[in-house]
Amino acid sequence: MSHELTGGVLLGRPTKLDWWVCGRYPFRTCAMGKKGKKEKKGRGAEKTAAKMEKKVSKRSRKEEEDLEALIAHFQTLDAKKTQVTETPCPPPSPRLNASLSAHPEKDELILFGGEYFNGQKTFMYNELYIYSIRKGTWTKVDIPGPPPRRCAHQAVVVPQGGGQLWIFGGEFASPDGEQFYHYKDLWVLHLATKTWEQIRSTGGPSGRSGHRMVAWKRQLILFGGFHESTRDYIYYSDVYTFSLDTFLWSKLSPSGPGPTPRSGCLMAVTPQGSIAIYGGYSKQRVKKDVDKGTQHSDMFLLKPEDGGEDKWTWTRVNPSGVKPTVRSGFSVAVAPNHQILVFGGVCDEEEEEHLEGSFFNDLYIYDAAKSRWFAAQLKGPKSEKKRRRRGKADDPEGATEEETGGTSAPEPLEVIKEVVSEDGTVITIKQVLTPSGLGVQPPPKADDSASEASSTGQEPCPRSSAMLAVKHGLLYVYGGMFEAGDRQVTLSDLYCLDLHKMEEWKTLVEMDPKSQEWLEESDSEEDSSSDEEGAEGGDEDQEEDSSEDSAEEGADPQHPEVAHGEQYEEYLSRTEQHWLKLARNHVGPDAKEKKVLRVAQAMAKACFDDAVPDIAQAKH
């Protein structure tokens, strides 16, 4: 049977949606990003899943071997870091499918990994950033021996030993976004000593992305996820536990009918000690070369049985209240009162060759004690609330977005393209792209008055695959993505909401989506060397672009400085976008991408060679 995957569209959107779900794009296939990406999702009975896993393992072995070589190259670069360095820095560059965790003892948020797609390349990250809540500043922390670059992993913080950050799995994507390596490694970051340690223990989960993991007593409990090769995919519904005392993995076999295989779901511990599973995404083949995605909206509780922590039972539940509308790619956090928060996401209308998504920025709360959903309501000025209600009653069809309490949307993006006609005439085309699916969403019809949400301040724009964390009763939302026409806009903004006051969102880091570079797909294949640099990524990419844009036309550009001890490969990776921009201006807009790349590398090498003697002289 053929298992050729069809191209996705939003998350390949082609879809990187697939990734999301994954952790990356936990909601669609998990692939959300570039046109032509292959969708990845599937679902089926346990027997079918077992057979598929064998096929996936066999067919993906070769491509994973190829990616292992690339991952090893980057680990060689990481191995040059021999001491811990902490450097104050601007906010991290835009990314998705990273992890954002609250430090258990300090007023800090911890950001690790993620990925970014610029229209041509996928950039993978393994940087570690610390956000100081009190100071409102970012610090980049370089620690020797970090985990390889990845996204769509899971990170869990526990208080042991002054605080530990545990990371399992995730994936590494090739620069062209067509191949994926799924990790099955387990790492711990000792926050007190700032050291990474890989924990090697057999019997754990297979390599996967888009899984979910929580801390339960002195264990890590992992559920679901998916694995994808070029030709096959498989979704999981298995459950594993990892003991923080014995450092051993165990596979659970809960009794009762449980969730179907999926990735990108909600997984959280309830006040009663059960584990809630809600929603998620999976894909299955309906006919040759045609896959159908499913955005799940069912809910289950995984409960420990009396008499032992190794016996568990699945129970399906049907909570009351205002449930989230059907979606995938939502983000999850747990409030201090153990209420479970669900933010944003996307609802896809999927056809065989097309995927159209509506993005959300609403917030829902699941009260496990009452088994009830609520749509969060933010408190605004009374005059505004009255005006909003009056507008609905008097003229519901002609009411404005502000009056109906609709979701705010990013401003349209203006894209200018130059096209050369057959007779050599250069034609300038200006196109205004409106973020797809960002229209006003009607509030859910239910008996809860909380279904009418409002906000008096600037709120996060609709998005999916954002990173969430809660600290001291404050909800933080970082990054994520939305789509505008054929563009994927990746975000780096940071918002905060006081969960006690529930008044309005506060903007901590702003971002103008229109400032983000988007490259058209290349007409020619790039050199393997450019693949390596693209996959490695660099957080200074966008900073170099912005500094270049601000330079006056014709002025002598300021080139990035070479750091002490920095190797050429590291310098080129960190400053790649700067040199690509200069190279495009030099060779013209019609030049092939391969030529642009060669010129960019030559310019970078010349600058590096000129700077190295000066650095050496300065040291003496």
Image (cartoon, rainbow, N blue to C red):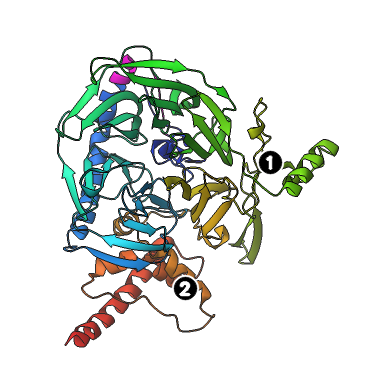
Closest to the observer, 170 or 399: 399
Q: Which residue is mark 2?
A: 547
Q: Amino acid at mark 2?
A: Ser
Magenta range? 40-50
Closest to the observer, 52 or 156: 156
Residue 528 colored in magenta in the image = no
* Residue 45 in view (yes/no): no
What residue sits 38% from the left and 58% below the top? 131
Q: Secondary structure at mark 2?
A: helix
The residue carrying pointer 2 sits among few (fewer than 14), some (14 to 19) or many (20 or more) residues within 10 Å by Cα, namely few
Q: Which residue is mark 1?
A: 440
Quarter of the figure that contains the N terminus: top left
What residue sits 65% from the left and 57% below the top? 431
Q: Residue furthest right?
A: 394
Image coords of residue 507 (percent x, y): 54, 57
* Residue 300 in view (yes/no): yes
Residue 407 quadrant: top right
Q: Is residue 107 above or below residue 223?
A: below
Q: Is residue 186 above or below residue 610?
A: above
Q: Is residue 349 above or below residue 129?
A: above
Residue 97 quadrant: top left
